[in-house]
């Protein structure tokens, strides 16, 4: 048997380059019990240069997860608690007048880090959210007259607390679309919770080792870009996205009145990129339909609008995505 | 003497008083309007108060009351009992006239029988005036209006329409049955049963083989077709929605069926693995892999096909035949 050279070479390259994924996973497992999906999503975001919106109740190791990931790759980490009185300058930085030098000097904000945890992003007003989302898209911020490039890799993990909605500023659909993934995390299982308790009451809390440098992530990203996506897979991705827009064309007439808007072209791009990163994590040089399905819920759950009919029938975007995946033919 | 006469008269009056009380009064006729427009209708009521036990015969009219006055309908005789023990009988007639003029309705006779005595009582006379429309000669003369067209209601056409349809249907059935009878065919057709999954799979496999896709280097198309045949077969045969499932999901579905041994599952895993490589990773499996994967599908169909008793005799291409054909194929590849 023979395999075409470039794919074989790519596979070998990915086998070699992706070995750090296992190491990171092992390090993360030292401090995070369970939440494998969260760690996997962080890796996908990191490798495909995307940002993550996280939804989960407090106390599910969100901060610990992103902090530990930052530590394993020797990267800078900032945690910003979003509050109603937060100002854009608190985030990006500001010009401060120095009496000694009789001049304005730049005081950079916490956004100048590799990993940002924007905690409870919906607690701040729209102008602060916009400042963050603009930085996420442009990867640079402007203070005074000067633009400053943000560090690379730059990953934002924003959290939303699903319990308290009073006094919050929900992110508009256009801004939510800028997050590559929306990850929903739930409580750990019984066995996992037992381990968490044991780990936290022990005298020494485990720490992660530094195993990578930010530069390694940047070069790994280049390899992820090379992961082969066949035309059949591309068509499958397009079919899924189109099914969110025109469900009736895919035999899903029951969803026609349930979806107010479907996935944008950015959703198609994100789904492809995330599938590539997932294939890389699975140490493969090509994308298979399993990869697309594995990331589909995270990529699409915040990109589908529900109608009043859907809400009245307690239908969620999860249900819609599952139904679409069960209907769209796999190549 | 005068006193004697007075007493005699009082005694006579007392003697005849019960008779006076039981007597029937004259019937009373009345109209609800004495002036009517030509063609209009008025009600003529005839009432009579009688004592109990009295028999009465009201006048009976045909369609004409008097010349120029028509009777449209007459009600039944209504009886109202009074506290005094007497009763009032009444009858209503609806009358009309189509000629203008003054009409006098004569006294109407009512026959009364009290005991053995029969008497005829007459009602009062009535008069009514029939007038026509006033014509304004100052205005232009209009033509007579045509009859008002009312829209048809369903009940008016239901009987002829449904009757017609039923008649047409009966005629059509009759013609159909006659034609079938003439052609010596059964009147009712049996629905064609769906082709069994294995027949479709065998036909498609045979067609795939004849097309010699992998021999031509079209491996992606070859594996796409091969896996489609396999997925359609398991969807039809085991109700597993394989067309909408990925390779891993198909394997899981087959494992969950608990019908296959580990060896079969491993063979299917290999088939799907190579198919994914060929379809999504530009892989070029060797000729041996292509034949083995084809054989895996064929043997899976052979082992799991559902055969209905009467189909057993129409033996389809067996696994042995296919293996022999594959050996020939391999020989051809090696030679060429």
Image (cartoon, coloured by chain):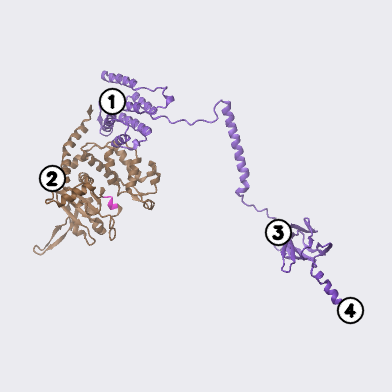
Chain colours: A brown, B purple
Tell me the CA gap for discs 2 and 3. Answer: 110 Å
Which comes before the other along the chain, label 4 or label 3? 4
Q: Check disc 4 and report the residue beneath it.
A: B5
State which chain disc 3 sits on.
B
Tell me the CA gap for discs 4 and 2. Answer: 156 Å
SS label for mark 1: helix
The vertical placement of A281 against A201, above or below, is above
- In reply to whether residue A175 is colored magenta, the answer given is yes
Specify the principal SS of the magenta part.
helix
Quarter of the view holding residue B161 = top right
Position in image of residue A30 (x %, y %): 15, 46
Tell me the CA gap for discs 4 and 3. Answer: 80 Å
Q: Quadrant of the C terminus of chain B?
A: top left
Q: Which mark is residue A213?
A: 2
Which comes before the other along the chain, label 1 or label 3? 3
Q: Check disc 1 and report the residue beneath it.
A: B292
Residue for point 26% across, 55% down: A161
SS label for mark 4: helix
Q: Magenta residues?
A: A174-178
Q: Nearer the viewer, mark 4 or mark 3?
A: 4
């Amino acid at each position: 048997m023979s395999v075409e050279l470039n794919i074989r070479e790519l596979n070998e390259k990915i086998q070699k380059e992706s070995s750090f994924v296992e190491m990171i996973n092992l390090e993360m497992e030292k401090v995070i019990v369970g939440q494998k999906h969260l760690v996997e999503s962080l890796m996908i975001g990191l490798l495909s240069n995307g940002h993550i919106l996280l939804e989960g109740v407090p106390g599910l190791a969100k901060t610990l997860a992103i902090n530990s990931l930052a530590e394993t790759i020797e990267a800078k980490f900032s945690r910003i608690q979003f509050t109603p009185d937060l100002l854009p300058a608190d985030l990006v930085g500001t010009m401060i007048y120095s009496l000694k030098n009789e001049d304005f000097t730049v005081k950079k904000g916490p956004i100048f880090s590799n990993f940002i945890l924007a905690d409870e992003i919906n607690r701040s007003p729209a102008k602060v959210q916009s400042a963050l989302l603009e930085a996420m898209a442009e990867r640079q911020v402007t203070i005074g007259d000067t633009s400053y490039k943000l560090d690379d890799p730059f990953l934002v993990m924003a959290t939303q607390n699903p319990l308290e909605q009073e006094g919050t500023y929900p992110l508009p659909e256009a801004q939510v679309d800028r997050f590559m993934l929306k990850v929903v995390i739930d409580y750990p299982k019984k066995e996992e919770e037992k381990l968490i308790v044991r780990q936290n009451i022990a005298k020494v809390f485990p720490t992660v080792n530094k195993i990578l440098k930010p530069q390694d992530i940047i070069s790994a990203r280049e390899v992820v870009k090379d992961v082969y996506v066949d035309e059949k897979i591309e068509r499958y991705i397009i079919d899924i996205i189109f099914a969110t827009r025109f469900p009736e064309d895919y035999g899903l007439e029951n969803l026609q009145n349930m979806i107010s808007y479907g996935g944008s072209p950015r959703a198609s791009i994100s789904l492809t990129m995330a599938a590539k990163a997932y294939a890389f994590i699975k140490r493969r040089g090509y994308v298979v339909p399993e990869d697309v399905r594995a990331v589909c819920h995270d990529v699409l759950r915040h990109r589908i609008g529900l109608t009043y009919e859907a809400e009245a029938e307690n239908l969620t975007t999860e249900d819609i995505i599952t139904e679409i995946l069960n209907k769209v033919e796999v190549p | 003497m005068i006193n004697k006469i007075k007493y005699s008269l009082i005694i006579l009056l007392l003697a005849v008083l019960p008779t006076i009380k039981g007597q029937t009064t004259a019937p009373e006729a009345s109209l609800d309007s004495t002036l009517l427009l030509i063609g209009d209708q008025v009600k003529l009521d005839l009432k009579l108060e009688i004592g109990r036990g009295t028999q009465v015969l009201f006048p009976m009219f045909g369609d004409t009351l008097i010349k120029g006055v028509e009777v449209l309908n007459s009600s039944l005789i209504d009886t109202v009992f009074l506290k005094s023990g007497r009763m009032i009988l009444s009858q209503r007639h609806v009358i009309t006239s189509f000629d203008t003029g003054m009409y006098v309705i004569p006294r109407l006779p009512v026959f009364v029988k009290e005991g053995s005595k029969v008497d005829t009582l007459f009602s009062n006379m009535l008069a009514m005036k029939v007038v026509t429309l006033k014509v304004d000669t100052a205005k232009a003369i209009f033509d007579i209006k045509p009859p008002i067209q009312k829209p048809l209601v369903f009940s008016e056409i239901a009987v002829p329409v449904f009757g017609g349809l039923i008649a047409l249907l009966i005629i059509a059935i009759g013609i159909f049955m006659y034609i079938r009878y003439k052609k010596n065919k059964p009147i009712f057709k049996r629905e064609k049963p769906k082709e069994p999954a294995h027949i479709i799979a065998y036909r498609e496999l045979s067609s795939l083989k004849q097309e010699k896709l992998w021999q031509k280097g079209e491996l992606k198309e070859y594996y796409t077709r091969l896996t489609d045949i396999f997925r359609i077969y398991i969807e039809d045969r085991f109700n597993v929605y394989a067309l909408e499932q990925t390779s891993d999901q198909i394997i899981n579905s087959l494992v969950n069926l608990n019908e296959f041994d580990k060896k079969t599952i491993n063979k299917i895993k290999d088939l799907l693995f190579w198919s994914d490589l060929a379809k999504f990773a530009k892989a070029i499996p060797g000729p041996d892999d292509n034949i083995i994967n084809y054989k895996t599908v064929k043997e899976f169909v052979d082992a799991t096909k559902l055969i209905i008793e009467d189909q057993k005799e129409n033996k389809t291409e067996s696994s042995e035949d296919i293996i022999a054909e594959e050996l020939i194929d391999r020989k051809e590849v090696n030679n060429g």
